[in-house]
Image (cartoon, rainbow, N blue to C red):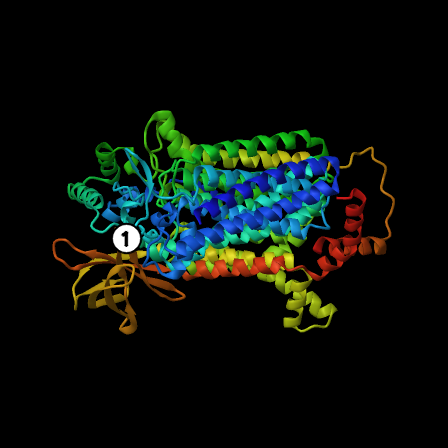
Amino acid sequence: MNQVGSVGLIAALAFAAYGVVAGAVGGKLRSRRVVRSAERATLAFVVMITLCVIVLEILIFRDDFHNAYVAAHSNRELPVYYKVAVLWGGQEGSLLFWTWLLSLYSGFAVLLNRRKNRQLMPYVISILMGTGTFFTSLVFFAANPFNELSLVSATGSQAFRAADGNGLNPLLQYHSMVVHPPMLYLGYVGFVVPFAFAMAALITRQLGDNWIRTTRRWTMVPWMFLGLGILMGANWAYAVLGWGGYWGWDPVENASLLPWLSGTAFLHSVMIQEKRGMLKVWNIVLVAVTFFLCIFGTFLTRSGIVSSVHAFAQSRIGPFFAAFLAIIVLFSATLLFLRLEFLRSENKLDSMVSRESGFLFNNWILLAAVFAILWGTIFPILSKALQDVTVTVGAPFFNKVTIPMGLLLLFLTGAGPLLAWRKTSFQSLKRAFAGPVALAAVAGVVLFSAGVRHFYAWMALFLSVFVAACTLQEFYKGARTRMQTARENFVQAIYNLTMRNTRRYGGYIIHLGIVLLFVGFAGQAFQTEAKGLLNEGDTMRVDDYVLRCQRVTSGEAPNYIYQRIELAVVKNGRALGTLQPERRFFPASQQSTSIVAIKTRLDEDLYAVLGGPDPESGKAIVEIFVNPLVIWVWIGGVVVFLGTLLALVPSRVEREMAGIRRPREEAVAEKYAL
Amino acid sequence: MLALAVFAALAPATAGEESAKPTLKSIGELLVCQCGCNYGLNSCTHNNCSSDEEISAFIQKEISEGKDQPAILKALVGRYGVKVLASPPAEGFNLAAWILPGLALVMGLGVVTLAVRRLRRPPPTATAPPAPPVDPDLLAAIEEEMKQVADA
């Protein structure tokens, strides 16, 4: 089976390399035959990488410990659903998984553009397969998951089969870990498609808004997956790591946030190009930066150049990534420089107070945040290299630097949509802002009177009210107009309004989700905690909660042994049930992990961690956190997800426009014979 | 409001904390556990972590001797090196860690302002001929059409 996997990788590499050449040559020679062969090579690449993934999963499910990867990352007792996750549980498998997702995106890009974007597609294929060639080479030459175990002795090496495997990293044995990495990878990998279209547009000098229109959904999909992946990771950290929070500004967390932020800037900035034909250079820069950051994030996670709690997938593949990053920068910067004359702005800015300038300021803050986070993340490397001093750049730094930026962004989230395209008069500005500002002012006073004294938390909640009011006002105003003109009731009006412009109203729903996220973030300022040593019958108190230890038990599950404590929870005299945090020990990997018990409510989470037995007293060490408003982070994430899904649905107007555009695109395809 | 946010960003957020009586928790938030877990001292999840216990005991001793937060942090740096701090001290080369994000923010604002100026339509000159009168109905119809296109 290992040989089948390796042969599959070689074949995939050959198809990808052919796709690079055939795409470029076919585009240059305008040869339909060559371009079609490049498309078929892309699809063959999909088939071959899919075959490799299937082979590796078979090896994992058959407990084939002759395979080095399976022996290192799986074991016999591992539950079935975690065996699926073994594919991305280690370096080699996760790189293969990355390549597989890349192949799927490439395959879809080819299939969905068989009669569209015919001038761009040869070069799009070439760039997608260029990335495919890099990753397949990496998998085959530097991190091959089909290597076999062997015993090396004086007489030579001999095939070896381990009796059992080391097992999957215990931290990864959690239900959301089965979904979190695929979501994150779908995000990272997916940005390759808009990048490929942008570069193809530069190569072919087709620099109108066609590539922007085509890639809008190709950008939103990875942006959505990346956001989901980040939130699932945060949820995992919250429920498994047991330190009471969900975001620690770890380098690997930061690496995933960077392309999400630059992708957000791109999604806003493209609207200026679509509507006004401006910022063409900037949009190319943004899409290239986003792709660069995706590869940089993968490099950061895997190279081991920064200390991270995510140390489960590190090896010496850093130099390969560094070279690829250099190629991306050189390639995109050179192309951009050569095509600058075709990227002139078609329009001028009419006023400083306009939607366009609102987007520019949004881009300013987002990119400043990208820089600040990137700078903080790589600063320890610079410090070590330049002054030979190991420094840590952790949560206190990032909180101090990024929270004000986050608040400015939150303000723009509400204010931006109130500005009109081209120019906003003072009168309309006053009309649009009066209600939300008044409402936010009332909320600010109420919050202050209620004892909210933490400046950032107060500001976040105050701005949340402002942004929510701005956004809901837009829905209300639109619905009111429809109720008057189309004689619809309020529900009908909201529905028709939204479906008529899914992009705009989907975007507003995303903004509401962002508001909820900030409400959740604000709650962190009011976290309280207590630590106690408990035996059966002992109690401890935190805030208004009293926790009584009812039972301490231990036992054995197929893959681990555990110690569990049962805590009866009472708040202000009212029984709220029990919490059962666990400590698990995994014999296969000789590692232990905690399973946090959380009682979730809309106002706060009660969060219990079992630290194990105290060496002196033998009592159980229990840590309790009261985390206000955390659930709003997860609800906000779901709202952002739903808003994105809505924005992906073609609106009525868009469907009509597509109908008009299609014959023209088909005529172009025919004319250029590609 | 924006000015307030920026002001808050520039003001050292720890100023208030430094003058308050230090606690194990408040100091622990500014430190990294030295066991290799890469978590903050208050967040180390290792069972009976010896590094966590050692640093915590040291802090307790320093607090009981009546030392203030800067003095305790200085003593910790002397003992474990600067890597024990969760953020680099604002001195020497490490000052760059703190300055550059703010500088980038300001420079970014400069770039955006410059871009806005360059992109901005020049105001009509005095010598330009007066615009011919436009039929208000036609203007309203155009504006409506443009709004629909913009909404699409």
Closest to the observer: A88 or A77?
A77
Q: Residue at x 35, y 25 (%)?
A: A387
Left or right of A655 on screen, residue A217: left
Residue A234: image location, x then y, percent: 41, 53
Left or right of A353 on screen, residue A609: left
Badge 1 marks a residue whose secondary structure is loop
Q: Quadrant of residue A16?
A: top right
Q: Residue at x 68, y 43 (%)?
A: A37
Q: Does B119 appear above or below A433?
A: above
Neighbor class of circle 1 (other Cα within 10 Å; few <14, some 14-19, many 20+) is many
Q: Does A275 appear above or below A83?
A: above
**Residue most toward the front?**
A155
**Residue most toward the left?**
A616
Q: Residue at x 29, y 49 (%)?
A: B43
Residue B141: image location, x then y, percent: 82, 56
Q: Quadrant of residue A61?
A: bottom left
Q: Which residue is mark 1?
A: A588
Q: Does B117 appear above or below A399?
A: above
**Image mark 1: chain:** A
Closest to the observer: A191 or B39?
A191
Q: Is residue A235 visible?
A: no
Identity, as a three-letter code, of the amino acid under mark 1: Ala
Q: Is residue A498 visible?
A: yes
Q: Residue at x 17, y 44 (%)?
A: B57
Q: Quadrant of the C terminus of chain A?
A: top right
Residue A126: image location, x then y, percent: 63, 39
